[in-house]
């Protein structure tokens, strides 16, 4: 079947046995990832303005080649790589049908990146599951930008804790801010991987949407900048009784024995997590300027970027409905709720993770008192 997306047209295999569009025994095209790809295109456009010399782009797990085709349409010199010969043929066909230059190669991405010192300005990792097996090769052989998608949200968020520990060398915890837990676990692992090559992997745009985590990491070759990011790693301590959470920087944890707010001893410690900013505000605004009408998910992308630009940098978020349920109170409109916090003198913002997610520097009792009517 033919699919149009973002101003290009690609062929994808017909769905078989009642599978969803573009999916059968092998998934070549996932229509639910259109927002991810729209944001990728807008980010690539904005990054070209930030770094005009960025020209080469590797679509490391090409499948149908849709991401690579769209990057080529955005003006990048594209290489699509995949270990599946049928996927490579399809990516090559889709580049040609859109009259776009680019190449498609049947290669494992790790072998390709380590072959003869191959370097790409932008490396995009969008595997099924964890991206960690490909992170070393990407950071060692990318020049400017590494884009990463992770779809194994259960290990990242702590729902499958032992798997998360194995894959990410971090202790994740399954909390009510589990999407942010997953993002900060992923960023911690990627920052530590890049630091092994004396590179800083600086998050300039990150988000959690549906069942995946996506981040764009700008590389800085200064080892001192990598040290700065390592200094942004640390631990979150979470009370399961009163929902108070604190955090500390450093690679050695000092978890409290009891909660200093309620005295409870049901405390969770998670880390090392990345506790710094998940995006560059100015860059997010420039990406938002590149969200144009031909993008099928333009409205959603614009809303997401607007929220990200204004989101506080605190390393955890609260869920309004969870708090109001605990207080046996009905939940007011989110805009009104946040304004109450601000009127009480606290910093507060929406958080992009969910419609009822918010960030603030207020403690839980302060949130309760500031929003009581």
Image (tube, grey):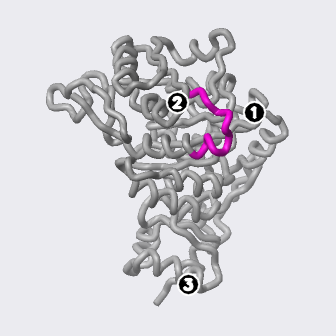
Marks 2/3: CA–CA distance:
43 Å
Q: Which residues are magenta?
A: 46-57
Q: Residue at x 59, y 66 (%)?
A: 244
Disc 3 element = helix
Q: Could you tell whether 326 is left or right of 47 in the image?
A: left
In the rendered structure, find residue 297 and report the number of the disc placed on it: none
Rendering quarter of residue 313? bottom right
Marks 1/3: CA–CA distance:
43 Å
- Position of the N terminus by quadrant: top left
In the image, residue 318 lies at what x, y percent?
52, 65
- Outermost residue, front direction? 99
Q: Residue at x 66, y 27 (%)?
A: 142
State the residue position of label 2.
Answer: 125
Badge 2 or badge 3: first in the primary sequence: 2
State the residue position of label 1.
Answer: 199
State the residue position of label 3.
Answer: 370
- Above or below 15: residue 268: below
In the image, residue 256 lies at what x, y percent?
70, 58
Pick the residue in front: 233 or 241: 233
- Above or below 22: residue 209: below
In the image, residue 124 lies at what x, y percent?
54, 31
Badge 2 or badge 1: first in the primary sequence: 2
The answer, for residue 158, to whether it is visible in the render is no
- Above or below 367: residue 290: above
Marks 2/1: CA–CA distance:
18 Å
Disc 2 element = strand
The answer, for residue 182, to whether it is visible in the render is yes
140 within the magenta span: no
Q: Residue at x 70, y 36 (%)?
A: 219
- Above or below 309: residue 39: above
């Amino acid at each position: 079947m033919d699919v149009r997306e973002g101003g290009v047209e690609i062929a994808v295999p017909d769905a078989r046995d009642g599978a969803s569009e573009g999916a059968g025994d092998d998934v070549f095209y996932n229509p639910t990832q259109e927002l991810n790809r729209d944001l990728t295109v807008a980010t690539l456009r904005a990054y070209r303005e930030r770094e005009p010399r960025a020209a080469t782009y590797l679509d490391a797990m090409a499948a149908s080649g849709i991401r690579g085709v769209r990057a080529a349409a955005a003006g990048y010199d594209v290489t699509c790589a995949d270990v599946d010969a049928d996927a490579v043929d399809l990516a090559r066909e889709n580049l040609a049908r859109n009259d776009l230059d680019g190449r498609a190669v049947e290669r494992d991405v790790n072998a390709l990146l380590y072959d003869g010192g191959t370097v790409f300005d932008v490396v995009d990792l969008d595997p099924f599951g964890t991206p960690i097996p490909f992170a070393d090769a990407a950071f060692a052989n990318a020049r400017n930008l590494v884009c990463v998608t992770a779809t194994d949200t259960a290990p990242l968020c702590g729902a499958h804790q032992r798997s998360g520990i194995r894959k990410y060398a971090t202790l994740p915890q399954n909390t009510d801010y589990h999407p942010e837990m997953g993002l900060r676990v992923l960023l911690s692992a990627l920052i530590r991987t890049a630091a092994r090559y004396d590179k800083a992997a600086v998050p300039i745009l990150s988000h959690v949407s549906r069942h995946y985590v996506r981040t764009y990491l700008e590389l800085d070759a200064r080892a001192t900048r990598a040290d700065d990011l390592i200094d942004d790693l640390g631990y979150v301590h979470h009370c399961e009784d009163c929902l108070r959470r604190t955090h500390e920087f450093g690679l050695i944890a000092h978890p409290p024995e009891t909660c200093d707010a309620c005295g409870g001893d049901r405390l969770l410690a998670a880390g090392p997590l990345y506790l710094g900013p998940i995006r560059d505000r100015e860059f997010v605004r420039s990406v938002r300027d590149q969200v144009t009408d031909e993008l099928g998910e333009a409205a959603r992308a614009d809303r997401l970027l607007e929220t990200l630009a204004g989101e506080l940098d605190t390393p955890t978020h609260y869920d309004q409905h969870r708090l109001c349920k605990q207080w046996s109170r009905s939940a007011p409109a989110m805009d009104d709720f946040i304004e109450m916090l601000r009127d009480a003198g606290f910093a507060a913002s929406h958080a992009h993770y969910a419609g009822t997610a918010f960030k603030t520097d207020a403690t839980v009792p302060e949130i309760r008192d500031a929003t009581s009517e």
